[in-house]
Image (cartoon, rainbow, N blue to C red):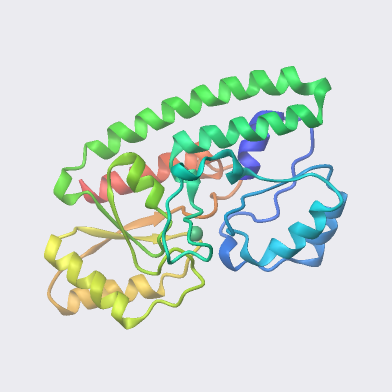
Amino acid sequence: MLGDAIKNIVKEDVQVVVLMGPGIDPHTYQTTQKDVQQLKHADIVFCHGLSLEGKMNDLLERIAQEKKVYAVSDALHTTQLLFEDIFPIGIDPHIWFDVQLWKQVVGFISQKLQAARPESAAYYQSNTFAYIKVLEQLHQSITTQIASIPKKQRVLVTAHDAFGYFGKAYNIEVVGLQGVSTVAECGLKDIKRIVELIIERNIKAVFFETSVSDKSMQAVVESCAHYGHKIGVGGYLYSDALGAPDTLEGTYCGMLRANTTTIVNALK
Ligand SMILES: [Zn+2]
């Protein structure tokens, strides 16, 4: 998501290296020796912050002693964040799922890049302006589409609690199986709690995630069947990583459009 935001601002002006690619789970990501080299060679480093890159924190702090390292979540005011005990630092890091917040993040990144390369500042500014317009349209489109799902059926059951900001921004109830971070193991109690809720609310579908194992959600589907409630799998949602490069889902906007279509088709 971060790499995509930066590429929309700088285009071909600078080389953008993304350390965590498609299908990667940032909560559990282990830094490689190659990553360390890439970070050492970089002129400027952007990370997400809010402890999303949990295992990289120490390395990022070390790198920050030598060069500019920005946590893009610093773009937001604390009142815009969701506080949940289940997260490592008590804050939900999945801010990209509210396009309005992501717009702020894009503006923040753009400012830092303009300061770092004054000779390209005007170019970055005009690219940012154009991209923000695209994000505004995206926000409107998601709002309209999610609102088309009848209120009672508007419940998103997913593998880990990545969709809190999405739920708040687009008015859809979100139930996660695994807690906010994928590090936490999903227990039998969690599965039982979700199965009861699905049956009680007559929910039509649950969703898998591209960067999280299907195992626990599969257990939910089987358990529902055991109790005579037929539940569908609405498909895969992109949560903490984009799709493959050169596919529609390989961009931030494409990823959100794909998720929205998947959700609307399964729940409506
Ligand atoms: Zn996550």
Residue 1: tell me if it is visible: no
Residue 127 screen position, x and y as percent: 64, 22
Q: Is residue 103 visible?
A: yes
The quadrant in which the C terminus is found is top left
Residue 203 located left or right of residue 89: left
- Examine the rendered structure and indicate whether residue 105 appears above or below residue 40: above
- From the viewer's perspective, tell me whether residue 265 is left or right of residue 107: left
**Horizontal and vertical percent for residue 102?**
51, 37
Q: Nearer the viewer, residue 234 or 56?
A: 56
Q: Position of residue 61 (x, y in %)?
A: 76, 58
Residue lying at the far bottom of the rendered structure: 188
Question: Residue sitting at 45 percent across and 77 percent down?
Answer: 185
Instruction: Tell me where residue 15 sits by quadrant.
Output: top right
Image: 126 above or below 175: above
Residue 73 percent location from the top left of the image:
58, 45
Residue depicted at x 47% and y 55%: 92
Residue visible at 73% across and 17% down?
122
Q: Is residue 106 above or below residue 54?
A: above
User: In the image shown, does 23 or 49 lie closer to the viewer?
Assistant: 49
Of residue 145 and residue 164, the one placed in the foreground of this image is 164
Q: Quadrant of the N terminus?
A: top right
Q: Is residue 203 above or below residue 253?
A: below
| Drawn side of residue 229 relative to residue 62, left or right | left
- Report the residue at 39% width, 53% height from top: 163
